[in-house]
Structures are given as C-alpha cells and as structure tokens.
C-alpha cells in the first residue's frame, strides 16, 4: 500500500442528491467519460466551493469503477458551503474536486482484535473500507471477530442503517452495534465511546479505528486508555477537520500522519502532524500560533507546550540546552519546546496542552 | 481563480509603526546588551582553535552566552567554519566541518539579556591566507562605510543597501542581501517589525533601534565574512575607520 495515487484536480457532475436524514446528504459525483480516478478506500477529497477553497469529505464508496464518487455530507450549523449544498444544489451541477488525500485505511490483515468506531458521517470512510474488504476474495478471515460501533445523535442520523446491515452480513464474524445519544429502548443508548468501554474489560491488545468529530476521537482514546488499558498508539484515526485547512490535510501525503490531541479539558481538538516533522510545525500549520521567534532552533523559548503525563516518557528527556532554557523561562512540569520534539509513529495519539502565555519570562 | 489580498496584509511601512518600541524598551539597557554581545563574541572567538569541529564550537558559544546571563536568544548562535561561512542566515551548516590552521570562521549571535535583545557578528582568521584575512577585514570595513553613509547622507534603508551592494562589488565581494539589516528592541522585536531594513523607504533612526548586517562572499571561492552591530553614530565606535 505504499504506492500513492497521484493528486489531481478534476471536474465532476452531481448525478444524485439524496437527503438521507435531516442532517445528512448523500451525493454522487460523476467524472467525465473515460476518467479513471484512483484512490484507496479511506481517503478523502476536496470539493471546491465557489470561493475556490476546498471543503474536505471522505469518499464513501470503495472504488470509482462506475465513474462515480459517493460523499456523505452532514450539515454544519451556519456553514455556508454545506448550507448551499442542502438548500440549492441540483442534479447536473458541476464542481471541481481535488485529491485523493489521506492515509486512513482498514487493513484486512489487521489485528484479530479490532474495534471500529464511527461518529455520524464518519461512517463514510469506514463504509468504503468495509466494502473494499467485502469484495476481496478471501478478504476477511471469518474466524476473526471485528466490532463496529456507529454512533449518532438520533436514530434518524444513523442514515442507511439497512444498507449497513446488508454490508455487515457480507463480513462473517463482524458485530455491529448502532448507538444513539438518546435511544428508544430498541437501540443502544449513550455516547458511542462509552459503549465500547462498557463492552470490553481490557483493551490492552486491541486496535481501534475511529472516524468522526475530534472530540469523540479524543474522548475515545483517552477514556479507553484511562479505564481499559488501551494503548493510544494503537489508535488509527481520521478526525473531521473543520474549515479551510487544506495544507494541514494535504501534508500527510509526504509522510505517515501522526495524530495529536490538544487541550482535552478546555477546547478539545485533533490535528494531524507528519512523521518526521517538528511538533511546532504541525501545531502552527493547524493554527495554534506559537511565536517560535527563533524559527524552531531551540533558542528563544516561545513555542512551549505541556505534554500530558502519560506521554512524557515517549517524548523523552530534553537535551542539556533545552533544559537550561526551560528553567530560564520558568517552565512547569511536562513543558517542552515544541521545536525540539520530532514527530514519529511512537507519538501517534500524543496529548498536549497549549499554554496561555507562549512567551514566558521568569518572575 | 481570483485571489483577493485581504486589506490587513497591505500594511504600510511607515516610520512610526516600524520603529515602535514597547514599554520596557530602554536605550541604556540596549547599549548594555550591546556591550555584553561584543564581549561574548570575542570570548567565543578566543576559545575557537584549529582542529575544532564546528558543532563543538556552537555548543561552546551557547555555554558562554548562558554563563553571561544570556540563556535566551532571539535567534540561535551561529559559529561557522570554512566553507560554511558562505551559508545564509538560518541555513543549516554542512556537518562536521573542522577548522583548519589557515582558515576563516564567523560568529553571529542574537542573545537576549533580561528583556532586551542584542545582536552582533564578526569574522576571524586562523592563519596567513591573505584573501581570507582581507575578506574578514573588509566585512568590518564595509560595515563602517555603510554606517557612515547613513550618518552623513541620511540614507533610507533601501538606498543604504543599494549603496552597500555597489560598495561590496567595488571591493571584489558579493553582498548577501538575505542579511540586510533589521529592527532590535525589547524581546521580541518581530512584534514591531520583522522585516529587513533594506525594505524601508525612510532613514532608520539611531535609537539603538536597528542593526546593520554585512555578509560578503568571495565571488568564486567558498568562503565569506560577516560583520554586524547596532546602527549607531561614530560616538559609539572606537574602531570606526572605514
């Protein structure tokens, strides 16, 4: 799977527009005749809005053999682009798409202990991956048990539930659990990440694949780690990222993504870094706005972040010069210069706290 | 696709905004840091010896700055040996360069003492190579030629560096315009103006509010020299012969 599909910008025509629920649209976009758009299940594309900026959506079908891409769009409150799609888009409308991007992928050779968690339209990339596996000859080992949890606010938001059940039947050994925030008795009730914790006593030997809102993914990773011995390094996540953050999302095409979770208590969000880059680069690309006056050379002490206690062993000890500067700026326990932490697979799931004052001085 | 430049990016480089200072700015403290910076440069230079690896010299320079109460730097300390003296600001040195017995090296430090920024640089030779010695001497000489032009002609930042390019060429060197002066103030000066002096169309004030940088390179050989100090009039220099 190392071969990457080339990124392209192509025109598409809207061929199908279905309101799958009050908050969900299922779109089908058709390429021009003869266009072969190659991608891997789990990847996403940018759909260009009128302002020329792309908005990013996971591809919900396993391949574009039929010349079409399926996208699941949930309405963003106050969002101009998704609002226009819901209210004004019509079959026959033309758009530009760019992509494919991203490295999310569920391997059919994944661990025998695998849990997949989707929140809302986070189901889309998982649908593509599961369709792909179902189509493979001997693609899925029936002796394995795979758990799939799909959570949403209400039963209506678990759109296309019958199609999901049909897909699940093609994957022997798969257990599907729909979860809604407030169930009606027939459907599991509560938050989807709590359902996972309720069902498993020990998650120390599990891989968890998760797609959905950053807050859900962060809560899933942290609470499974705190309460069920889950190793956050075994989280493979595809968080939604709001807004025009194309550069951030595109960056993983140059290296494996390293998922980072920020400020879990106050303003939880997930961002994607890239294997090999400095932490400060990932943070600033995602709008954290650390000063980093010296340009990431470890000299100025204006890119401080606090590493969560459970991650401090993995981020390692600061070098002599960094220790000296940390003492000088009055850094607290776990504070590090983010320019001195190089991202790697070991740090996938890293939890950080941004500090209110990036430029500190001694008393 | 039409690109619209947001109004906020169309910032006019007027003198009042570019030369702003913060509440903690102090002329006397800035001059004190200047003295500490010059002293540190000479202490670092005195401890650099032929046979030393550049990375060890950088470590040594950082230790000297820390011992002098300048742990923080608004930029990192550079000590560059031999062919690395042609590298521009911020560029990584080629690793493992050992200083020769007839070689050239430069020092460029940007320390912060308490609230105030220093910035300075100088170039030294270890042997008798006449070209290298002339290069090091000319960087200092050109610094003063350009500084005197500012003092005598009230040159703007832009015309001052146009003058510097031509003067360097007449001396047989190429001026690296990546290093073309900048603000200095209470830390960090980038809050006021992060750009080069060569971009401003007014006469930089004395202050001290600015530093003048001169990085010259040999037109064909792989060495260069650097000299940098605050932009001040003759009264602040004992060794100001242009």
Image: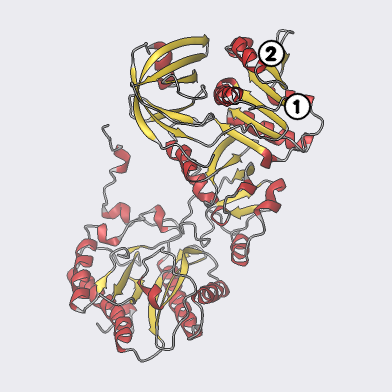
Residue located farthest toward the bottom when viewing the structure as drawn: B128
Q: Nearer the viewer, residue A272 or A208?
A: A208
Q: Quadrant of residue A45?
A: top left
Where is residue B50 drawn, in percent x and y?
A: 48, 86
* Tally of numbered discs: 2
Label 2: chain letter: A
Q: Secondary structure at mark 2?
A: loop
Where is residue A18 drawn, in percent x and y?
A: 47, 10
Q: Nearer the viewer, residue A267 or A76?
A: A76
State whether discs 2 and 1 lie on one chain: yes
Q: Is residue A116 left or right of residue B65?
A: right
Q: Is residue A313 visible?
A: yes
Q: Which residue is mark 2?
A: A182
Q: Nearer the viewer, residue A198 or A16?
A: A16
Q: Secondary structure at mark 1?
A: loop
Where is residue A222 drawn, in percent x and y?
A: 70, 36
Q: Is residue A67 left or right of residue B162?
A: right
Q: Is residue B232 visible?
A: no
Say few, some or many: other residues with alpha carbon within 10 Å of mark 2 (under 14 / 14 to 19 / 20 or more).
some
Q: Quadrant of residue A224?
A: top right
**Quarter of the picture holding the C terminus of chain A:** bottom right
Q: Quadrant of residue B85?
A: bottom left
Q: Which residue is mark 1?
A: A143
Q: Is residue A162 above or below residue A41?
A: above
């Amino acid at each position: 799977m190392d071969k990457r599909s080339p990124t392209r910008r192509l025109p598409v025509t809207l061929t199908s527009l279905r309101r799958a629920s009050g908050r969900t649209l299922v779109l089908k976009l058709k390429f021009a005749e003869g266009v072969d758009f190659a991608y891997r299940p789990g990847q996403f594309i940018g759909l260009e809005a009128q302002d020329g900026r792309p908005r990013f959506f996971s591809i919900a079908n396993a391949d574009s053999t039929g010349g079409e891409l399926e996208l699941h769009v949930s309405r963003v409150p106050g969002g101009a682009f998704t609002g226009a799609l819901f209210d004004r888009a019509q079959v026959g409308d033309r758009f530009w798409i760019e992509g494919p991007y991203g490295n999310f992928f569920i391997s059919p050779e994944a661990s025998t202990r695998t849990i997949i968690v989707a929140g809302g339209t986070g189901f889309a990339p998982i649908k593509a991956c599961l369709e792909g596996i179902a189509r493979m000859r001997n693609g899925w080992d029936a002796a394995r048990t795979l758990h799939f949890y799909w959570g949403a606010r209400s039963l209506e938001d678990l759109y296309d539930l019958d199609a999901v059940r049909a897909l699940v039947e093609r994957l022997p050994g798969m257990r599907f659990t729909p979860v809604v925030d407030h169930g009606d008795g027939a459907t599991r009730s509560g938050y989807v990440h709590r359902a996972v914790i309720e069902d498993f006593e020990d998650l120390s030997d599990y891989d968890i694949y998760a797609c959905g809102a950053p807050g859900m993914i962060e809560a899933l990773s942290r609470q499974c780690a705190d309460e069920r011995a889950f190793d956050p390094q075994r989280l493979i996540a595809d968080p939604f990222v709001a807004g025009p953050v194309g550069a951030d999302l595109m960056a993983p095409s140059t290296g494996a993504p390293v998922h980072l979770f920020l400020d879990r208590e106050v303003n939880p969000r997930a961002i994607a870094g890239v294997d090999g880059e400095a932490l400060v680069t990932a943070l600033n690309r995602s709008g954290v706005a650390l000063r980093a006056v010296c340009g990431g050379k470890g000299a100025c002490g204006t890119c401080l972040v606090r590493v969560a206690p459970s991650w401090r062993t993995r981020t390692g000890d600061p070098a002599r010069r960094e220790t000296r500067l940390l003492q000088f700026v009055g850094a607290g326990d776990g504070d590090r210069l983010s320019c001195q932490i190089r991202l790697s697979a070991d740090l996938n799931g890293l939890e950080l706290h941004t500090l209110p004052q990036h430029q500190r001085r001694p008393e | 696709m039409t690109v619209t430049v947001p109004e906020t990016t169309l910032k006019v480089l007027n003198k009042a905004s570019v030369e702003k200072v913060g509440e903690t700015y102090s002329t006397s403290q800035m001059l004190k840091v200047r003295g500490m910076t010059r002293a540190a440069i000479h202490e670092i230079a005195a401890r650099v010896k032929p046979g030393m690896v550049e990375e060890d010299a950088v470590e040594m320079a950082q230790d000297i700055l820390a011992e002098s109460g300048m742990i923080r730097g608004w930029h990192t300390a550079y000590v560059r040996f031999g062919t690395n003296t042609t590298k521009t600001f911020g560029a990584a040195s080629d690793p493992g360069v050992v200083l020769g017995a007839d070689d050239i090296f430069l020092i460029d430090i940007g320390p912060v003492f308490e609230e105030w920024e220093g910035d300075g640089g100088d170039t030294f030779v270890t042997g008798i190579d006449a070209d290298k010695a002339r290069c090091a001497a000319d960087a200092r000489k050109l610094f003063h030629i350009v500084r005197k032009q500012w003092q005598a002609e009230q040159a703007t930042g832009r015309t001052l560096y146009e003058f510097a390019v031509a003067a360097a060429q007449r001396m047989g060197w190429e001026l690296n315009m990546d290093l073309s002066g900048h603000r200095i103030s209470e830390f960090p000066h980038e809050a006021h103006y992060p750009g080069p002096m060569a971009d401003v169309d007014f006469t930089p004030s004395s202050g001290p509010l600015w530093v003048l940088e001169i990085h010259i390179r040999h037109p064909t050989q792989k060495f260069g020299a650097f000299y940098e100090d605050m932009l001040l009039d003759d009264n602040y220099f004992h060794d100001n012969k242009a």
